[in-house]
Image (cartoon, helix red, strand yellow):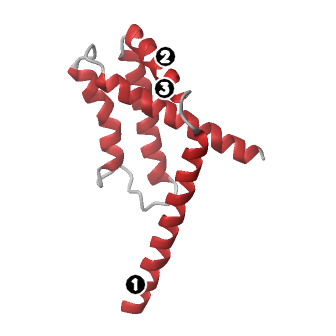
Amino acid sequence: MKVIEKGKQLFQWILRNGYLLYLIVRNPKIPWYIRLVMFVPLAYVLFPMDIISDFLPFLGQLDDFVVLRYGYLVLFKIIPPMVLEESRKRAETKLSQINWKKVKRTIVIVSICLVFTLVGSIYVLTRLG
């Protein structure tokens, strides 16, 4: 059960920080260069050309993780503290109102759809090839 709890904590951490970053981007007190710094790590991960290719089993994902981790650490250092605290409070207030049962149901339904899509794609590709 520890693994499930760790997974829940990781999901909530990602959701909380993702929503926090969304609120920070939408805040009019944030200058343009901080918004640019916010999208650089994300663009690096999504851009197909990496320093270390993602086809290498472990190293390809490791460099993406390092860029994301330290890029957002730098970002949280340069955001004005008042804006960061204000956005954190708004995020906590909004996320405390979420109905987690609906979120779990949605995740299950989306996961099932993804599995069916994957199985169907594999089936079609094996029939065509």
Kindly report which numbered mark, 2 or 3, lies closer to the viewer in this rendering.
3
Please give the label number shown on residue 94.
3
Q: Earlier in the sequence, mark 2 or mark 3?
A: 2
Tell me the SS state at disc 1.
helix
Q: Earlier in the sequence, mark 1 or mark 3?
A: 3
Residue at position x 57%, y 41% from top?
11
Give, as a three-letter code, the residue at label 1: Leu
Kindly report which numbered mark, 1 or 2, lies closer to the viewer in this rendering.
2
Query: x, y percentage for residue 77?
Result: 41, 17
In-front residue for pair 17/99: 99
Quadrant (top left/top right/bottom left/bottom right) for the C terminus:
bottom left
Residue at position x 41%, y 9% from top?
81
Query: x, y percentage for residue 110?
Result: 49, 58
In-front residue for pair 93/117: 93
Q: Earlier in the sequence, mark 1 or mark 2?
A: 2
Tell me the distance, in whole angstroms, between the alpha carbons under discs 1 and 3: 44 Å
Q: Is residue 38 left or right of residue 59?
A: left
Crowd class of label 2 (few under 14; some 14 to 19; many from 20; radius 10 Å): few
Q: Residue furthest right?
A: 1
Residue 5 occupies which quadrant of the picture? Answer: top right
Query: x, y percentage for residue 2?
Result: 76, 44
Residue 113 vertical position relative to residue 103 in the rendered view, above or below: below
Circles 1 and 2 in contact, beta carbons < 8 Å: no
Tell me the SS state at disc 3.
helix
Give, as a three-letter code, the residue at label 3: Lys
Tell me the SS state at disc 2.
helix
Please give the label number shown on residue 108.
none
Give, as a three-letter code, the residue at label 2: Lys
Question: What residue did someone put label 2 on?
Answer: 89
Question: What residue did someone put label 1 on?
Answer: 125
Q: Residue furthest top?
A: 82
